[in-house]
Amino acid sequence: MVSGVQPVARAKGTAIYEPNALIAAAQTVLGPEHPVLAAGVFGLQDSYRSIVLRSLINGDGAPGIAVREGRERAAKKQGLTLAMLIAVTADTIHVLDFPATGEPTQQFMEFDRATSKVKVIWFGMSRRVHIQNADGTRKLRLTGSLAAFSVTSAGARAVLDLIAA
């Protein structure tokens, strides 16, 4: 746990993916000086080339294992985690870790909302989000689910409503 970050206080029975719980979780890392407008859980965009290659290398024809391995490898290579909490403030898009506890402990990177390029691409019931800072030195490709049955859809939708505008 990062020094000074306290666990999120949730009412009993409150799901960690509930939008207000995600906002509260992000707020614990960012502090009161950065009011969070929306927060949602996203993952890195999959590389289908990597999935196919990993399935062939493993020789097991099990794409599910290749997907997981590919995601873990990509996250590690970029210094990220499998799931990330994207928190939007008035001026910034913050990328935080999102461990299984639902209690983020650190910020990985941030993008200025005024100068960064954001592209949202429809992909079935998901949205691919490409974020790039103004000078092109930092890029992030994410996927978030908007499927009605997904526990992460409400937070993802709130984030997309703000950053795609």
Image (cartoon, rainbow, N blue to C red):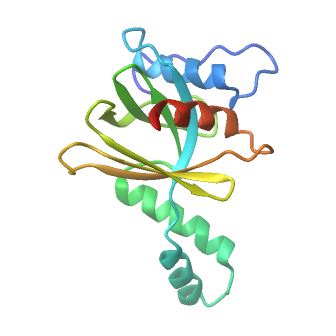
Report x, y in % for residue 47: 49, 69
Q: In the image, is residue 104 above or below residue 143?
A: above
Report x, y in % for residue 63: 66, 77
Say which of 36 and 4 sits in front.
Answer: 36
Q: In the image, is residue 151 above or below residue 49?
A: above
Residue 144 visible in this rendered orientation of the protein: yes
Report x, y in % for residue 50: 48, 76
Residue in the picture at 68% in, 33% down: 154
Residue in the picture at 64% in, 34% down: 101
Q: In this view, does 81 lie to the left or right of 21?
A: left
Q: Is residue 138 left or right of residue 50?
A: left
Q: Which quadrant of the figure has residue 65? A: bottom right
Q: In the image, is residue 153 above or below residue 69?
A: above
Report x, y in % for residue 136: 22, 51
Say which of 104 and 52 sits in front.
Answer: 52
Residue in the picture at 80% in, 45% down: 149
Q: Which quadrant of the figure has residue 18? A: top right
